[in-house]
């Protein structure tokens, strides 16, 4: 299958009322299971290399792995850099073959965030690559507090940066291991009104959003991408722990890690169906 850009999978989602999963990848085993799930569901998929993943595995290796899986897949697959911290990091990802980059300038003053994101979006578009930005600040469970997205700032950010997708803070939090109280739908509606619902919105920290709310908002709002990481990592860890503690003397890492494939694939399929992206590829 042709490697897809973020715009190529999110614009149909925005138009037709569903969302695409941005799955957080850490290695071969989970990434392969995600793609297998997307093929089983005939769903587009976004493979994401976040900062933790990049600290463990060099970006060129991730690009080659993602690209190999995307090229063999029967569905559109986006190769996405998540939470890029600089123009240089985004440029490296583009040079390696990523089809989408996210620049995270959310901790910057508004004008600096707009200026830097706009420059990276121009660079990406010149290379035929998509760009995601963030306005407001999505915090972390047990860490930095969120700063909700201001609708007027969101409208300005979307207009002045030219991003293909915009991550917003509306009650979502990174790294939640338990489902939280849900997104602030009034805040989300205000952002949608201010931006004219023209730019696909992205929810980082999607694992903490109740499943029924994810499904409903994917179908009825401009949210076209949910980032899902923690719940999938928890499924991977639980499956691996069961295999290690099963009483056998198995020591081969391939045999041990293979036990994670089916549980991760099955949970990913459930998420894809929940977001309405099955049979959309």
Image (spheres, rainbow, N blue to C red):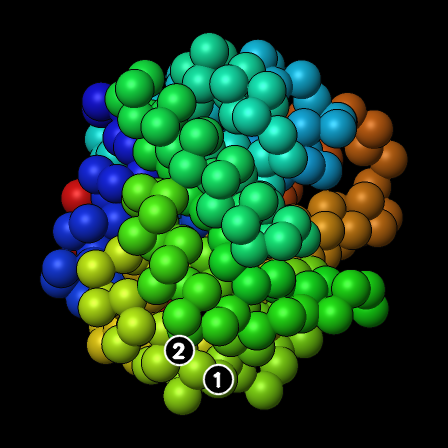
**Is residue 69 visible to the viewer in this orientation of the structure?**
no
Instruction: Please tell me whether residue 121 is drawn above or below residue 185 in the rendered image.
Output: above
Q: Which one is nearer the viewer's eye here, 40 or 81? A: 81
Q: SS class of the residue under badge 2?
A: helix
Apparent side of residue 27 relative to residue 281 in the rendered image (left or right): right
Task: Give the label on residue 196, or none.
Answer: none
| Corner quadrant of residue 6 | top left
**Residue 78 x %, y %:** 35, 34
Question: Can you tell which mark lies on residue 184?
Answer: 1
Residue labelled with disc 2: 188
- Residue at x 52%, y 83% (from the top left corner): 182
The residue nearer to you, when weighing 183 against 66, is: 183
Quadrant (top left/top right/bottom left/bottom right) for the C terminus: top left
Badge 2 density bin: few <14, some 14–19, many ≥20, Cα 10 Å: many
In front of the other: 42 or 148:
148
Whole-percent x and y of residue 168? 48, 63
Q: Residue 84, image x and y in percent?
A: 59, 35
Q: What percent of the width, then of the height, locates residue 198? A: 21, 60
Residue occupying the point 81% across, 32% down: 250
Secondary element at tag 1: loop
Question: Is residue 87 in sight in this rendering?
Answer: yes
The answer to whether marks 1 and 2 mark residues whose Cβ atoms lie closer than 8 Å is yes
Quadrant assignment, res 214: bottom left
Seen in the picture, residue 66 relative to 246 is either above or below; the reply is above
Within 10 Å of disc 1 (Cα), the crowding (few <14, some 14-19, many 20+) is few
View extreme (front): residue: 111
Q: Quadrant of residue 58?
A: top right
Residue at left offset 65%, top offset 50%: 108
């Amino acid at each position: 299958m042709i490697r897809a850009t973020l715009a190529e999978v999110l614009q149909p989602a925005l138009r037709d009322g569903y969302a695409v999963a941005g799955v957080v990848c850490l290695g071969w085993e989970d990434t392969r299971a995600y793609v297998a799930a997307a093929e089983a569901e005939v769903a587009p998929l976004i493979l994401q290399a976040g900062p933790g993943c990049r600290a463990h595995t060099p970006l060129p290796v991730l690009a080659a792995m993602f690209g190999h899986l995307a090229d063999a897949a029967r569905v559109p697959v986006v190769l996405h850099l998540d939470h890029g911290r600089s123009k240089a990091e985004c440029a490296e990802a583009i040079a390696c073959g990523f089809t989408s980059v996210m620049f995270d300038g959310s901790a910057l003053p508004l004008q600096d965030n707009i200026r830097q994101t706009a420059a990276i979006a121009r660079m990406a578009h010149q290379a035929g690559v998509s760009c995601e930005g963030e306005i407001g600040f999505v915090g972390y469970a047990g860490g930095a507090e969120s700063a909700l997205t201001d609708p007027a700032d969101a409208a300005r950010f979307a207009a002045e940066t030219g991003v293909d997708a915009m991550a917003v803070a509306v009650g979502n939090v990174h790294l939640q291991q338990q489902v939280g109280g849900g997104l602030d739908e009034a805040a989300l509606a205000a952002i949608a009104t201010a931006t004219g619902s023209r730019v696909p919105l992205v929810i980082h920290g999607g694992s903490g959003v109740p499943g029924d709310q994810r499904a409903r908002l994917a179908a009825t709002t401009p949210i076209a991408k949910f980032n899902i990481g923690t719940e999938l990592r928890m499924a991977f860890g639980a499956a691996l722990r069961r295999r290690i503690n099963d009483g056998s003397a198995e020591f081969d890492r391939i045999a041990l890690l293979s036990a994670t494939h089916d549980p991760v694939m099955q949970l990913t399929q459930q998420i894809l169906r929940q977001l309405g992206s099955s049979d959309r590829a």
